Image (cartoon, rainbow, N blue to C red):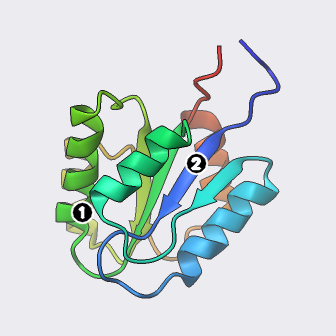
Amino acid sequence: MDTNARIRVVVAKPGLDGHDRGAKVVARALRDAGMEVIYTGLHQTPEQIVQTAIAEDADGIGLSVLSGAHLTLFQDVLEQLKAQDAADIVVFGGGIIPEEDIQPLQDMGAARIFTPGTTMESIVEWVRENVHTHAA
Protein backbone atom coordinates (compact mmCIF):
# COMPACT_ATOMS: atom_id res chain seq x y z
CA MET A 1 0.00 0.00 0.00
CA ASP A 2 1.25 3.48 -0.86
CA THR A 3 1.75 5.26 2.44
CA ASN A 4 2.05 8.59 0.60
CA ALA A 5 -1.41 8.30 -0.94
CA ARG A 6 -3.72 11.06 0.18
CA ILE A 7 -7.38 10.62 0.98
CA ARG A 8 -9.50 12.05 -1.87
CA VAL A 9 -12.86 13.53 -0.89
CA VAL A 10 -15.60 15.04 -3.03
CA VAL A 11 -17.50 17.71 -1.11
CA ALA A 12 -20.87 18.30 -2.72
CA LYS A 13 -23.99 20.42 -2.42
CA PRO A 14 -26.85 18.34 -3.81
CA GLY A 15 -30.21 19.76 -4.75
CA LEU A 16 -31.44 23.31 -4.89
CA ASP A 17 -29.95 24.63 -1.66
CA GLY A 18 -27.92 27.75 -2.42
CA HIS A 19 -25.98 28.07 0.83
CA ASP A 20 -22.47 26.68 0.61
CA ARG A 21 -20.41 28.40 3.27
CA GLY A 22 -20.38 25.34 5.54
CA ALA A 23 -19.39 23.04 2.68
CA LYS A 24 -16.53 25.37 1.76
CA VAL A 25 -15.34 25.52 5.38
CA VAL A 26 -15.32 21.71 5.60
CA ALA A 27 -13.59 21.42 2.22
CA ARG A 28 -10.88 23.83 3.35
CA ALA A 29 -10.40 22.03 6.69
CA LEU A 30 -9.96 18.70 4.90
CA ARG A 31 -7.57 20.26 2.40
CA ASP A 32 -5.56 21.96 5.14
CA ALA A 33 -5.31 18.56 6.86
CA GLY A 34 -3.53 17.20 3.76
CA MET A 35 -6.41 15.59 1.90
CA GLU A 36 -7.20 16.10 -1.75
CA VAL A 37 -10.59 17.80 -1.98
CA ILE A 38 -12.80 18.27 -5.01
CA TYR A 39 -15.61 20.77 -4.34
CA THR A 40 -18.43 20.37 -6.85
CA GLY A 41 -20.18 23.68 -6.30
CA LEU A 42 -23.88 24.33 -5.88
CA HIS A 43 -26.94 22.59 -7.32
CA GLN A 44 -25.46 19.18 -8.10
CA THR A 45 -27.63 16.18 -8.89
CA PRO A 46 -26.89 12.86 -7.21
CA GLU A 47 -25.82 11.56 -10.63
CA GLN A 48 -23.35 14.41 -11.11
CA ILE A 49 -21.91 13.89 -7.63
CA VAL A 50 -21.40 10.17 -8.16
CA GLN A 51 -19.90 10.67 -11.62
CA THR A 52 -17.47 13.23 -10.18
CA ALA A 53 -16.50 10.87 -7.36
CA ILE A 54 -15.85 8.03 -9.81
CA ALA A 55 -13.97 10.24 -12.30
CA GLU A 56 -11.81 11.66 -9.50
CA ASP A 57 -11.21 8.23 -7.93
CA ALA A 58 -12.57 9.59 -4.66
CA ASP A 59 -12.40 7.67 -1.42
CA GLY A 60 -15.26 9.58 0.15
CA ILE A 61 -18.16 11.90 -0.56
CA GLY A 62 -19.18 14.57 1.90
CA LEU A 63 -22.69 15.90 1.31
CA SER A 64 -23.88 19.22 2.72
CA VAL A 65 -27.66 19.52 2.84
CA LEU A 66 -29.57 22.43 4.35
CA SER A 67 -32.75 22.23 2.26
CA GLY A 68 -34.62 19.53 4.17
CA ALA A 69 -34.33 17.05 1.30
CA HIS A 70 -31.53 15.07 2.98
CA LEU A 71 -33.35 11.71 3.12
CA THR A 72 -34.03 11.72 -0.61
CA LEU A 73 -30.67 13.17 -1.65
CA PHE A 74 -28.55 10.81 0.46
CA GLN A 75 -30.62 7.84 -0.72
CA ASP A 76 -30.21 8.86 -4.35
CA VAL A 77 -26.43 9.25 -4.01
CA LEU A 78 -26.11 5.90 -2.23
CA GLU A 79 -28.27 4.16 -4.86
CA GLN A 80 -26.25 5.73 -7.70
CA LEU A 81 -23.02 4.51 -6.09
CA LYS A 82 -24.39 0.96 -5.89
CA ALA A 83 -25.62 1.11 -9.48
CA GLN A 84 -22.15 2.24 -10.62
CA ASP A 85 -20.43 -0.52 -8.60
CA ALA A 86 -18.82 2.17 -6.43
CA ALA A 87 -20.43 1.46 -3.06
CA ASP A 88 -16.96 1.34 -1.49
CA ILE A 89 -16.88 5.15 -1.61
CA VAL A 90 -17.68 6.30 1.93
CA VAL A 91 -20.60 8.74 2.14
CA PHE A 92 -20.85 11.15 5.05
CA GLY A 93 -22.40 14.53 5.47
CA GLY A 94 -24.07 17.16 7.50
CA GLY A 95 -26.18 20.23 7.52
CA ILE A 96 -29.51 21.03 9.05
CA ILE A 97 -30.59 17.46 9.67
CA PRO A 98 -33.04 16.65 12.48
CA GLU A 99 -31.80 14.21 15.12
CA GLU A 100 -34.61 11.77 14.25
CA ASP A 101 -33.34 11.51 10.66
CA ILE A 102 -29.75 10.59 11.54
CA GLN A 103 -30.40 6.89 12.21
CA PRO A 104 -32.47 6.42 9.01
CA LEU A 105 -29.63 8.02 7.03
CA GLN A 106 -27.12 5.69 8.64
CA ASP A 107 -29.42 2.71 8.07
CA MET A 108 -29.48 3.49 4.32
CA GLY A 109 -25.67 3.59 4.23
CA ALA A 110 -24.45 7.05 5.24
CA ALA A 111 -21.37 6.41 7.38
CA ARG A 112 -21.67 9.54 9.54
CA ILE A 113 -23.87 12.61 9.88
CA PHE A 114 -22.40 15.76 11.40
CA THR A 115 -24.73 18.26 13.01
CA PRO A 116 -24.35 22.03 13.41
CA GLY A 117 -21.67 22.90 15.92
CA THR A 118 -19.41 19.97 15.06
CA THR A 119 -15.80 21.10 15.12
CA MET A 120 -13.67 20.95 12.02
CA GLU A 121 -11.09 19.00 14.03
CA SER A 122 -13.60 16.24 14.78
CA ILE A 123 -14.66 16.03 11.12
CA VAL A 124 -11.03 15.81 9.97
CA GLU A 125 -10.26 13.16 12.60
CA TRP A 126 -13.32 11.10 11.63
CA VAL A 127 -12.43 11.25 7.93
CA ARG A 128 -8.83 10.22 8.65
CA GLU A 129 -10.03 7.24 10.69
CA ASN A 130 -12.91 6.11 8.45
CA VAL A 131 -12.16 7.05 4.85
CA HIS A 132 -9.29 5.09 3.40
CA THR A 133 -7.50 5.48 0.10
CA HIS A 134 -8.07 3.01 -2.71
CA ALA A 135 -4.37 3.20 -3.61
CA ALA A 136 -2.71 -0.18 -3.75
Q: Which residue position is annotated with label 2? A: 9
Tell me the CA gap for discs 2 and 1: 18 Å
At 69% from the left and 56% from the top, the residue drawn is: 30
- Name the quarter where the C terminus is drawn: top right
Q: Residues within 10 Å of mark 2 (few under 14, many from 20)?
A: many
At 39% from the left and 47% from the top, the residue drawn is: 51
Q: Which mark is residue 73?
A: 1
* Three-letter amino acid code of the residue under disc 1: Leu
Q: Quadrant of residue 43?
A: bottom left
Residue 134 image offset from top left, x and y in percent: 58, 24
Sequence order check, earlier mark of 2 and 1: 2
- The residue tagged with tag 2: helix, strand or loop? strand
Q: Quadrant of residue 119?
A: bottom right
* Three-letter amino acid code of the residue under disc 2: Val
Of residues 136 and 32, which is closer to you in this image? 136
At 45% from the left and 39% from the top, the residue drawn is: 54
Asked whether residue 122 is in view, the answer is yes
Asked whether residue 112 is in view, the answer is no
Q: Residues within 10 Å of mark 1 (few under 14, many from 20)?
A: some
Residue 15 image offset from top left, x and y in percent: 29, 74
At 76% from the left and 17% from the top, the residue drawn is: 2
Q: Is residue 39 above or below residue 52?
A: below
Of residues 127 and 1, which is closer to you in this image? 1
- Residue 78 horizontal side relative to residue 23, left or right: left
Q: Which mark is residue 91?
A: none
- Residue 31 horizontal side relative to residue 56, left or right: right
Of residues 10 and 98, which is closer to you in this image? 10
